[in-house]
Amino acid sequence: MTLSPHQKVSVALYILSVFVAFLYSDIFTPPQTYFSTKGNILNVFFIKKGWFWVTVVYGCYVYFVLSKRWSTQQVTQSIYRFTCVTVYWYVMTQWLLGPSFIDRVYVATGGSCTPPAYDDGDVSTQQQQLTLLLSQTFRQSTCRQLGGRWSGGHDVSGHCVMLIHASLFFWEELSWLFYSIPAATQLKRTQPSAWRSFLAVLALLVLWWWMLVMTAIYFHGHFELVSGCIFGVLGWASLYLGLFPNLPVIGLPPQSL
């Protein structure tokens, strides 16, 4: 299948951004900044709750922009697409008949939940029970909540998966922008609420790109970033190049607003 211009630009943007960022971190010593700590507000308030923000921003975009300019059928199709994209994110990062796909990859490659280092001396019965419980834990989030260490496996970058997957989804739904910039200026002139919703999507895209670059510079190894990129792009490719064009009830978003 031949990629459209907007697809070539958007996919290349994220792959090259990750490549250049981790190349920079390899060649130079990145300075410690506010974004080099996991406790920065953008990571805690936005990235950790990433799909919540994707849902809110896209919901406003559908209501204030698409519902005023597209047919009811097209708006319904946009909701179907969002549902499919959400299912992919959920399976990858949250739940797949138990642990998420990413957690299953980690365990399959030798990872496990191990107990914290105990003080020298006899291990108490409570510590033995905790060790047994941790050995039967296959979710990263549960492991850390119990005080265990998630170690030993291939840790696919969940940040990369979510940020790239969500961003490519937005660019597909905003594909009209690549072919009709005057439509955006018309929104600004005639529909203030639609214009603000459109700007919210662009703002989230900028934030997602910035945090993707920070992730590639400060967190995860190269192979973890590469696998995160692969699975981030795979969701877009399987849906927007595979499923949607061949399923008329869902289809692709129009390239005009």
Image (cartoon, grey):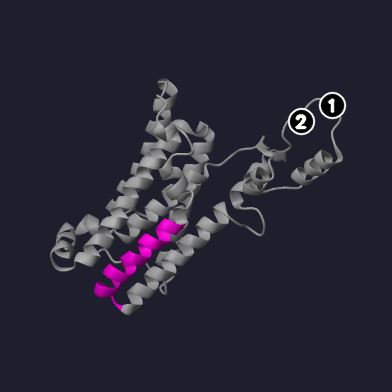
For numbered disc 1, what is the local secondary structure? Answer: loop
Region in magenta: 52-71
Q: CA distance from mark 1 to mark 2?
A: 8 Å
Number of numbered discs on residues: 2
Corner quadrant of residue 28 = top left
Q: Is residue 136 left or right of residue 103?
A: right
Kindly identify the amino acid type of the residue bearing the numbered disc 2: Tyr
Which residue occupies 55% across, 52% down?
Answer: 93
Query: Is there any visible trace of residue 34 in the rendered image?
Result: yes
* Marking on residue 121: 1
The x, y position of residue 124, in whole percent, is: 85, 36
Does residue 98 lie above or below 44 as drawn? below
**Proximity of marks 1 and 2: CB atoms separated by less than 8 Å:** yes
Q: What residue would you read off at disc 2?
A: 118
Kindly identify the amino acid type of the residue bearing the numbered disc 1: Gly
Q: Residues within 10 Å of mark 2 (few under 14, many from 20)?
A: few
Front residue of 147/238: it is 147
Q: Residue furthest top?
A: 28
Front residue of 143/92: it is 143
Which residue occupies 24% across, 66% down?
Answer: 194
Which residue occupies 37% across, 66% down?
Answer: 59
Quadrant occupied by the C terminus? bottom left
Front residue of 126/252: it is 126
Whether the magenta-drawn stretch holds residue 39 is answered as no
Quadrant occupied by the N terminus? bottom left
The x, y position of residue 153, in whole percent, is: 65, 37
Corner quadrant of residue 29 = top left
